[in-house]
Amino acid sequence: MSDACAGCTGRCCWDVVVRVTGLDAWRIRRSQGLEYAQFVNVLPDDDPGGESFRIGDRLCSLYLAKNPLQPRACTFLMHLPGEQQRCGIYAERPLVCAAYPMQLRYGSVDLRSDVRCAPSDWNLATLDYRRWRETFTAYAFERAVFGRIATQWNELAPMEDDAASQSRFFLYIDAAAAAVEGMEVLAEVDAACAALLGAPLP
Amino acid sequence: LRVPDRVEHWLACREKRCCSYLLVYVTGDDVARIARSLAVEPWLITAPIEADAAQPGAFALDARGRRYRLALVRTRLSDDADPSCEFLMRVGDGAARCGLGEGRPQPCRSFPAQLVDGEISFATAECSCDWSRVTIDRDADTELLRAERSARERYDEVVDQWNDYVATVDAQTTLTHRDFCRYLMDAYPR
């Protein structure tokens, strides 16, 4: 955890609806022993992109659920004494959360313009640039991998109603995430996913 | 990644009564690790619990003989709920989860395994889960519990040194839980 986050009151975990990849969701599910429906929502995309997947006849994405008792807060936000708030899945948090509040701007790590923490919390002169760049590299690659997983699904999965399609998609994510773990070549991801969709899912 | 049967069973439990009925006594190693990983001051996440002076790991705050043990702080998730661990979270459908994950204290990592006369058994009397079909991994759990005992012995030595120091302060001085936590962070450097 960075020094800037040490005094954090978790504002980035309030209000923001966090879109995650299926690979993020799979890691959380595996480490926490949860079912997908317990912590993610499948919602239609207003602005479908390369990682959108088809559920029924709509393109959708996965979003972290909110806390039912505090509907603005992420379901995994822990409320600790002293007004402190911390991520309850810090080691397995989605890569989009790990990359916050930085962005790559003109190829360099920079603070986002829409940060919810005080910009003065972050001193660019003291950033560990290598660590941030590694995070962005991992995030970009994982988005690409999930994009291929989603594309294969969109092309090959059967047309079903929303409930059946979502159930099958979660089975597919489990199988695909396990199958592509460690793969570094996107064409291999395509082949692995196509093979999964050509056979009954476990 | 292979998750042991015991851990998988615990992860899958929706209720996690163990996080309510057990007071989690921690070592300096647990406290320093959790405080650093969350960047939260250790006195915010622990509480001093009065203890028998003869209890290993019981620390003094003054020279008058009262002793305490350090436990994870507890809270009530709702007005009518039993106190439970501060780090217990409930996801949308009410299922309980540990917010410390792999960073949880050693007694939680080994729960409900215990080592008695060199044999592993499960202490589950107050637990609502059925543990009867869970496979005991004797080698892994023995290793885990031995590491836990070793950490506890080291902590007892650290506490003994603290108590020796407290015995030298004048009778009017009372140190605080916060002072003890600061000492632990110093005794367990990064």
Image (cartoon, coloured by chain):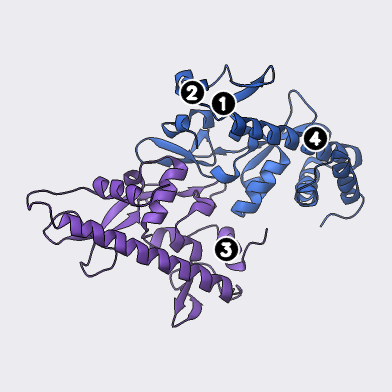
- The residue at the point 35 percent across, 46 percent down is B42
Q: Label 3 is placed on what type of residue?
A: Val
The disc numbered 1 marks a residue on which chain?
A
Residue A140 screen position, x and y as percent: 72, 32
Q: Residue furthest bottom?
A: B117
Which residue, given by chain and number where applicable, does mark 4 sit on? A147
Residue pictured at 31% horizontal, 56% vertical: B70
- Give the alpha-carbon distance from disc 2 to disc 4, as whole Å: 32 Å
Which residue lies under the disc numbered 3?
Answer: B7
- The label number, if any, that marks residue A55 in the structure image: none
Choose mark 2 or mark 4, whichever is in front: 2
Q: Which residue is mark 2?
A: A122
Q: CA distance from mark 1 to mark 3?
A: 34 Å
Badge nearest the viewer, 3 or 2: 2
Picture layout, residue A7 above or below residue B30: above
Specify whether disc 4 shares its chain with disc 3.
Answer: no
Crowdedness of circle 4 by 10 Å Cα count: few (<14), some, many (20+)? many
The chain whose colour is blue is A
**Front-lying residue, A54 or A187:** A187
Number of marks present in the image shown: 4
Instruction: Pinpoint the chain carrying mark 3.
Output: B
Q: Residues within 10 Å of mark 3 (few under 14, many from 20)?
A: some
Q: Residues within 10 Å of mark 1 (few under 14, many from 20)?
A: some
Pinpoint the chain carrying mark 2: A
Q: CA distance from mark 3 to mark 2?
A: 38 Å
Nearest to the observer: residue B83 or residue B158: B158
Label 4 marks a residue whose chain is A
Say if mark 2 contacts mark 1, CB within 8 Å: yes
Rendered residue at 81%/32% (across/down): A58
Spot occupied by residue B171 in the image (x, y as percentages of width and height): 7, 53
Say which residue label 1 marks.
A101
